Each structure stands twice: as structure tokens, then as C-alpha cells.
Amino acid sequence: MHENKTEDKIIVGNEIFTPFISEKKINDRVRELGKEITEDYKDKLPVFIGVLNGASLFHADLIRNVDLECEVDFFKLSSYGDDKISSGRVKLVKDLGCDVKGRDIIIVEDIVDSGLSIKFIEEMMEKHKPASMKVAALLLKPKSLRYNVKIDYIGFNIPDKFVIGYGLDYAQKYRNLRAIYAINEENGK
Ligand code: IMP
Ligand code: MG
């Protein structure tokens, strides 16, 4: 049970998270992205590559809103660091199971913050020579971007605030919240 969760806030230690993007808004936007991708990939057989663990929910919902034949795969990255601040280093923990050579791939990410993870993924994928590569991210923090990356499908641009829910974690928890909650600035960042 979420012991410290009420309708309008979640308390984690001495930090407070409040509702930020509702379940309905998420669902509506994911449906729109699915339609857009369906249009863009007509007559193609894309591979939706989810980045574990965070993108698992978005990935599952996105592909169900795409009206195309498609394939799926996943890999997993780890970034060392504390719970809220990335260390600036990423490593591959679980590799893909399929050969993406000559395939149209769509990388599915939960959130792009500095852009380091996406940069790492793009460089890694390019070595496998896909026919095309695009990136879909549910959230983008434009003010935090430090790397030159192009995100092709963006769910929401958000301010530079730490968020949880809908796949996004705080110390591995809260991924199963149906909505997205943002940290209350007065209580930390
Ligand atoms: P980047 O490599 O700096 O772009 O960070 C991307 C990764 O950091 C995401 O895939 C998330 O796992 C994590 N991350 C960044 N911002 C947040 C956040 O606000 N909440 C939860 N995880 C985040
Ligand atoms: Mg992630």
C-alpha cells in the first residue's frame, strides 16, 4: 500500500509530490502520438525499442495506440548516481534481443533530461546500422538538455522538476502510479 498517498499529494521522506499530469491527459496524448506514428510509418514494420525500466508503461500504451504491424524489443541502461541526480555516466545492462540492421526503429523513452541517455543510445544503435531511427519520449525537460539530441515525438515539454509515476521512479518506487506527480519546489528539487 502507498502509505503516504492522498488524493492531492504523496509524501516521500520529507518531500511532497503533487499531481502534475493526469491519467486522462497522459492517455489522450499517448493516443495522439500513436496516431502520428501510424501515419508516419504506413507500409513499414517498425521496431519499438523500449528503454527499461522507466519506459515500460509508455511503451505498452504507445504500441496499443499504433495501428500497424510492428515488433518490440527492450534494452536496459543504468546510470549511477543518487536517487534524483544523474551521475553523468550510463552503461548498458541488458542488450537488445533482435538484429536492428536495416530496420526502422523507434526508441521509446520515459523522459529526456540532460539527453545523455539518448545520446548514448543513438551512438550505440548507429553501430547496428538501422534503416532509420527516431525517438519518442513521453516527457522532455528542454531547460535541462545538455546534449545535442533530436526527439521526434514528444508527449509533454515540462519544467526542470523531478517527477514520478507512469513508469518514472524515485529510488525504484512509484512507477505504478497512473498519473505523473511533480516534486514540490519548496521542499527540494
Ligand atoms: P538523461 O540521460 O539526463 O536525459 O536522463 C534520462 C534518465 O534519467 C531517464 O531515462 C530517467 O530514468 C531519469 N530521469 C530524469 N529525470 C527524471 C525525473 O524527473 N524523474 C524520474 N527519473 C528521471
Ligand atoms: Mg529511463
Image: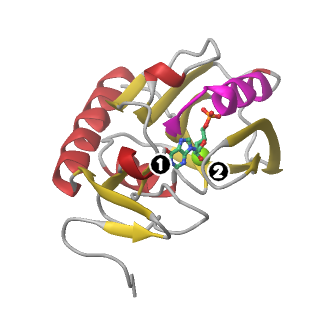
Q: State the residue position of label 2.
A: 74
Work out whether residue 160 or residue 126 is closer to the camera in this orientation and state it: 160
Q: Residues within 10 Å of mark 1 (few under 14, many from 20)?
A: few
Vertical placement of residue 38 versus 184, above or below: above
Work out whether residue 189 or residue 20 is closer to the camera in this orientation and state it: 189
Q: Is residue 53 left or right of residue 22?
A: right
- The x, y position of residue 153, in whole percent, is 40, 26
Q: State the residue position of label 1.
A: 188
Which type of secondary structure does the marked residue at label 2 adopt?
strand
Q: Residue at x 18, y 44 (%)?
A: 28
- Judge whether residue 7 is colored magenta: no
The amino acid marked with disc number 2 is: Phe
Q: Residues within 10 Å of mark 2 (few under 14, many from 20)?
A: many
- The x, y position of residue 118, in whole percent, is 64, 29
Q: Residue at x 53, y 15 (%)?
A: 150
The amino acid marked with disc number 1 is: Gly
Q: Residue at x 42, y 43 (%)?
A: 69
Q: Residue furthest front?
A: 186
Vertical placement of residue 10 versus 116, above or below: below
Rendered image quadrant of residue 121: top right
Q: Residue furthest top?
A: 148
Q: How many marks?
A: 2
Magenta-colored span: 111-125
CA–CA distance in space, label 1 to label 2: 33 Å
- The x, y position of residue 16, in whole percent, is 37, 61
- Judge whether residue 124 is colored magenta: yes
Work out whether residue 100 or residue 158 is closer to the camera in this orientation and state it: 158
Q: Residue at x 30, y 33 (%)?
A: 33
The N terminus: image quadrant? bottom left
Q: Residue furthest bottom?
A: 1
Which type of secondary structure does the marked residue at label 1 adopt?
loop
